[in-house]
Image (tube, coloured by chain):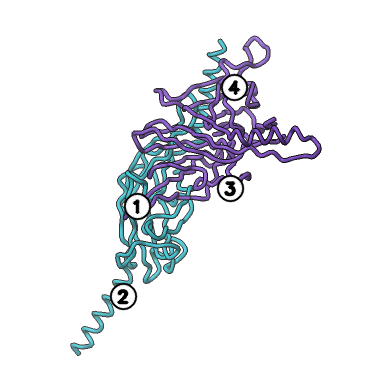
Chain colours: A purple, B cyan
């Protein structure tokens, strides 16, 4: 998945200005947009919403954050307890504009979903919103499979940069358009003993989701600030 | 050695997933490009809103209609341009007990007028009940764990599902018939 993130330079500049006046405490919101490219279909990829639409989690409704999707576009979120949640963007059979099965379904930063592109052309989904910042950006992780993404729109090594809490025996699975589609990354201690290491640490793109198979439940907590 | 251990762990995890997993389908009678099976009421108007209920029934492949069991929640119908299609939102995924992931299942959509009762059992037996069901459909389910990652495949769409019309409960016809016969006999006397 090729992604391109453009944050508004003017706002970043404002952040710099705000920090230079250290007399008061300012809330520095960084807004922008991110283009997430969905490969040509018909086929699937795993996408994520890298930005907080209106500055709060409940604003990240699919009807707000997914722009530019064609009729037939479908999202499949994964709930470790109940399985897939299926949400199609369909036009009425008799004609009319496409609508979501569930327009209020949330796709928050940190979550991810399989996306079905029904067309033979690549799609560019433009996400808009704030960069999530704070000292406790928390993504819950169940034991077993989790479909997740980075809450912060950064490209980088999943643990070294993005702070994923890998534990001995964990796996990460990235989805590709190759055959077979899964890229598999293992985090394990050597059989002879020693600290666990990645066989190859995955690099996660902005707007990319992935499956994390956790040995034990926990949380992915990130501290991030644009300073 | 390390790779062997990983392979064993993954195999065990997949085995566990297999043991717990069941076949899955997408309970939706409209999926753009693949499923279009609207439900109409007893006068041929598309079932609309909360006046009608629908439910998915399913069982192992080859099951007769009488052996199917309900799968998941009862839902209403959508409105406007989507009248005739079930209102499942994003919760159309259904897990079919007793059917292994990827195995064939037989499914049926059943629908009835809300005025006929809160459940299929009531609506299909109450005098005057208005209800109907789709022809049985046999299809391969989803939920198949990837052999390496264990990530389950997506629920299968109900490709091949046929639309249907609700009809009054047959006893109602019988009552009409008895009434007509009584009227006829009375006239002859």
Q: Nearer the viewer, residue A193 or B177?
A: A193
Is residue B87 placed above or below B105 in the rendered structure?
A: below
Which numbered disc, 3 or 1, marks the residue closer to the eye?
A: 3
Is residue B130 visible to us here? yes
Q: Nearer the viewer, residue A36 or B51?
A: A36
Query: Mark 4 falls within which chain?
Result: A
Q: Are marks 2 and 3 in contact (CB under 8 Å)?
A: no
- Determine the CA span between mark 2 and mark 4: 73 Å
Image mark for residue B186: none
Are discs 2 and 4 located on one and the same chain? no
Q: Are marks 2 and 1 in contact (CB under 8 Å)?
A: no
| Residue visible at 49% across and 40% down in the picture | A84
Query: Mark 3 falls within which chain?
Result: A
Residue linked to disc 2:
B175
- Determine the CA span between mark 3 and mark 1: 44 Å
Residue B40 horizontal/vertical position (percent): 33, 61
Residue linked to disc 3:
A59
| Residue visible at 39% across and 37% down in the picture | A117
- Determine the CA span between mark 4 and mark 1: 53 Å
Which numbered disc, 4 or 1, marks the residue closer to the eye?
A: 4
Image-based side of A152 in relation to A39, left or right: right
Residue linked to disc 4:
A157
Where disc 3 sits, the SS reads: helix
Q: Residues within 10 Å of mark 2 (few under 14, many from 20)?
A: few
Are discs 2 and 1 located on one and the same chain? yes
Residue found at the very far right of the displayed protein: A23
Image mark for residue B65: 1
Where disc 2 sits, the SS reads: helix
Which numbered disc, 2 or 3, marks the residue closer to the eye?
A: 3
Q: Quadrant of residue A22?
A: top right
């Amino acid at each position: 998945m090729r992604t391109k993130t453009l944050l508004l330079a003017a706002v970043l500049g404002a952040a710099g200005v705000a920090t230079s006046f250290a007399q008061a405490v300012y809330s520095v919101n960084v807004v922008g947009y991110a283009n997430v490219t969905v490969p040509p279909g018909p086929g699937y990829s795993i996408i994520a919403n890298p930005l907080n639409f209106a500055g709060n989690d409940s604003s990240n409704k699919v009807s707000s954050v997914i722009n530019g999707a064609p009729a037939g576009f479908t999202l499949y979120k994964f709930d470790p307890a109940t399985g897939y949640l299926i949400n199609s963007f369909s036009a009425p059979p008799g004609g009319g504009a496409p609508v979501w099965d569930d327009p209020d379904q949330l796709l928050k930063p940190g979550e991810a979903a399989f996306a079905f592109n029904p067309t033979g052309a690549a799609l560019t989904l433009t996400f808009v919103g704030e960069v999530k910042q704070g000292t406790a950006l928390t993504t819950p992780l169940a034991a077993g499979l989790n479909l997740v993404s980075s809450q912060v729109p950064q490209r980088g090594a999943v643990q070294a940069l993005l702070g994923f809490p890998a534990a001995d025996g964990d796996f990460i699975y990235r989805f590709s358009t190759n055959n077979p589609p899964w890229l598999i990354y293992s985090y394990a201690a050597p059989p002879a003993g020693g600290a666990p290491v990645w066989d190859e640490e995955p690099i996660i793109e902005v707007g990319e989701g992935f499956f994390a198979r956790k040995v034990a439940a926990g949380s992915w907590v990130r501290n991030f600030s644009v300073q | 050695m390390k790779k062997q251990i990983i392979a064993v762990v993954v195999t065990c995890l997949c085995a566990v997933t297999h043991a717990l997993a069941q076949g899955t389908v997408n309970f939706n009678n409209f999926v753009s490009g693949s499923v279009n099976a609207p439900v109409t009421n007893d006068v041929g108007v598309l079932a609309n809103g909360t006046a009608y209920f629908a439910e998915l029934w399913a069982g192992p492949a080859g099951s007769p209609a009488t052996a199917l069991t309900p799968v998941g929640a009862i839902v209403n119908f959508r409105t406007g341009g989507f009248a005739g299609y079930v209102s499942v939102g994003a919760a159309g995924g259904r897990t079919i007990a007793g059917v292994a992931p990827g195995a064939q299942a037989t499914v049926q959509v059943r629908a009835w007028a809300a005025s006929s009762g809160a459940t299929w059992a009531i609506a299909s037996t109450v005098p005057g009940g208005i209800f109907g069901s789709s022809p049985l459909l046999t299809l391969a389910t989803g939920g198949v764990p990837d052999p390496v990652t264990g990530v389950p495949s997506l629920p299968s769409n109900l490709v091949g599902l046929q639309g249907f019309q609700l009809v009054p409960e047959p006893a109602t016809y019988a009552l009409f018939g008895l009434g007509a016969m009584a009227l006829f006999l009375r006239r002859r006397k």
